[in-house]
Image: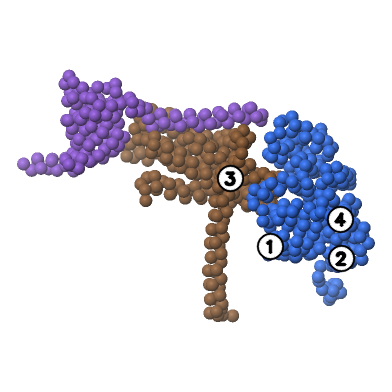
Chain colours: A brown, B blue, C purple
Amino acid sequence: MKPSKIMIHHYLLNAVRRMGINALDVCAGFGRASWFLVQSLTWGKGFKAPFSRLVFQVYQQGVLSLPIILVAGLFVGMVLALQGYHILVGYGSQEAVGQMVALSILREFGPVVSALLFAGRAGSALTAEIGLMKTTEQLSAMEIMGVDPLKRIMAPRLWGGIICLPLLNLMFCVLGIYGGALVAVDMLGIYEGSYWANMQGSVEFYDDIVKGVIKSLVFALVVTWIAIFHGWNAHPTSQGISTATTATVVQASLAILALDFVLTAVMLGGF
Amino acid sequence: MDNYVELKNVTFRRDGRLIFDDISLQIPKGKITSILGPSGTGKTTLLGLITGQLSPEFGDVMVDGLSVPNLSRQALFELRKKLSLLFQSGALFTDMSVFENVAFALREHTNLPEHMIRDLVLLRLENVGLRGAGQLMPSQLSGGMARRVALARSIILDPELIMYDEPFTGQDPVSKGVLVTLIRSLNADLSLTSVLVSHDVEEALSISDQVYVLSHGQVIASGTPQQLRDSEDKELKQFLFGLPDGPVSFHFPAKPLVEEVLV
Amino acid sequence: MTSKRLEISVGAFVIAGILSLVVLAFNASGLSFARDDQSYFLYARFENLSGLSERAKVSLSGVTIGRVVSIELDTEDYVAVVKMAIDKNVPLTTDTSASILTAGLLGEKYIGLSVGADEETLMNADEIADTQSSIVLEELIGQFLFSRSE
């Protein structure tokens, strides 16, 4: 049966209508997420109890993420030195490998890779934990007892992430640069003085280190926000939690990479 | 007689499906009221309407004289201190011990000194027979014990209304008996208003002062347990006595057997 | 994990993070230069900066003794005015000369100072009179070609 013009018309109209509804849904989703973020940033009355909850979160998200971050930092630095050496040696500038490793790590690899690893490890754990609390009705029970779960459960986790990721990033960078030194000096024979002197001459505290930390802070907020939001919205079934956890890792990773471009563009030269 | 909770002409929809269709019910103060009905009729939704977690499409929900859907966040917060809800699974906070779970509301809403909190928690655990279990973690408790701890947790602030969501489901006869006794004695000792939502007919009828039976979003019967037992209504009879066939058909719609098998 | 051990590990974590920042600051970025109260300021005018940027090094006999703090254009004389922060412990004679040099073949520009024989030293906010602008490759080639043609 040949599709008549009216049917095609209908189909197109429906497609546009669905696009509109989807766009409004996305908008509504952002709205809910923003309201959620604002509510989760404050932690209600008192200081001692919220602080100890925060400390526990820093332990869960920071201390427990150390192994993966430190090992990753070391290997990233070592590979950068190795690859960098082989590129620079073609120009006779292999003495500049220290500078190359340091700038790459401080500006890009540090903030981005540590954020991606954090999203995968701590982010997914957060989503699963909160999703499970939702499934076992703990969040509902808390609400009915007159305690705002956003302030009691979400806020410490959000602030925990904001504190942990920049610190993890700094440790990643240290291990990366020293790992690079290990490869460059001990393995490839670069003069140790050149490695560090060249680096120090071209790495600016404000431009490179501080901006890297700023990137890390932005990533920390976005990744943790996405993680707790998906946990909060998860369907209270095991399928629902698994979907939410995957969504966290995928969306957080994409957000990191997209924001990295935007931040780098702004920092390097403004629009 | 005073009604602690009143639903007036409430209509509620979820995902387009009509859950309640213009229903009205009254929960009298100081008594135990049961809400019975087949699974999926929205009995838990009813509790959500009372606590203000859900809002009706039409109609009003009155709790202790206040109209719940119209309360401000602050007022709702205050009201919830007088209510308590016992979840089907207990919903204990898994990262805290039994003691801390029961003490939760005290720590959040009062400034009582530590020794007073300790005394109150132990008294409530005594009420439910679990005073020695204070240091256990929720993962170490059996289902029945978890529910009793949840019960202790929900009465710690001396609420005026307590709601039980399917308290007997999946329990062995001994646990059921314990819960039945607890519900009855707590209601009397603490002058509570209790609302029981369940599909365990016998247990619910044995302690209720008043019963509502819901089906397909409507109230199909209400009255004292004896009135319900004496009723002639076919649908009610099928539900109350667990008859396999009646208005709720045993057979899923299909062609006659003769046609399917012999042709 | 007891509460005490948890708190200790969190404290150690935070301290390690801050220490990392310090290590990076001093070992990776060479941020060792002292703040304002340990330096005095000197000015120098150049016709052509050609790539000298703010925070470039100022060195004497190869030793870094200061940084370029700001670069401005004098709109009356149309020269570049460079403000430098020099370590207080390094006195410079009034006939010190300043040149803009290149570190390595493709390296960055820096200011190299050369001390003279005068007895007096430059004070805060003084100006270095003897300056040599940076060497622009095109001009050099032009000079070479020009002189060859004679």
Residue C63 to residue A25: above or below: above
Q: CA distance from mark 1 to mark 2?
A: 28 Å
Of tags 4 and 3, which is closer to the observer?
4
Name the residue at 73% across, 62% down.
B10
Does label 3 lie on the same chain as label 4? no
Subunit that carries the residue with mark 1: B
As drawn, the label of residue B210 is 4
Number of other residues with Cα within 10 Å of mark 4, as a class: few under 14, some 14 to 19, many 20 or more: many
Where is residue B197? Give x, y as percent: 81, 53
Type of the residue with mark 4: Gln
Subunit that carries the residue with mark 4: B
Q: Quadrant of the N terminus of chain B?
A: bottom right
As drawn, the label of residue B57 is 1
Name the residue at 72% across, 62% down.
B59
Does label 2 lie on the same chain as label 4? yes
Q: CA distance from mark 4 to mark 3?
A: 43 Å
Residue carrying label 2: B235
Residue carrying label 3: A40
Query: Which of pointers 1 and 4 lies earlier in the amino acid sequence?
Result: 1
Number of other residues with Cα within 10 Å of mark 3, as a class: few under 14, some 14 to 19, many 20 or more: many
Judge left or right: residue C65 versus residue B30: left
- Label 2 SS: helix
Type of the residue with mark 2: Glu
Judge left or right: residue A224 versus residue B256: left
- Label 3 SS: helix
Subunit that carries the residue with mark 3: A
Name the residue at 75% across, 31% down.
B116
Type of the residue with mark 3: Ser
Query: Which of pointers 4 and 2 lies earlier in the amino acid sequence?
Result: 4
Q: Quadrant of the C terminus of chain B?
A: bottom right
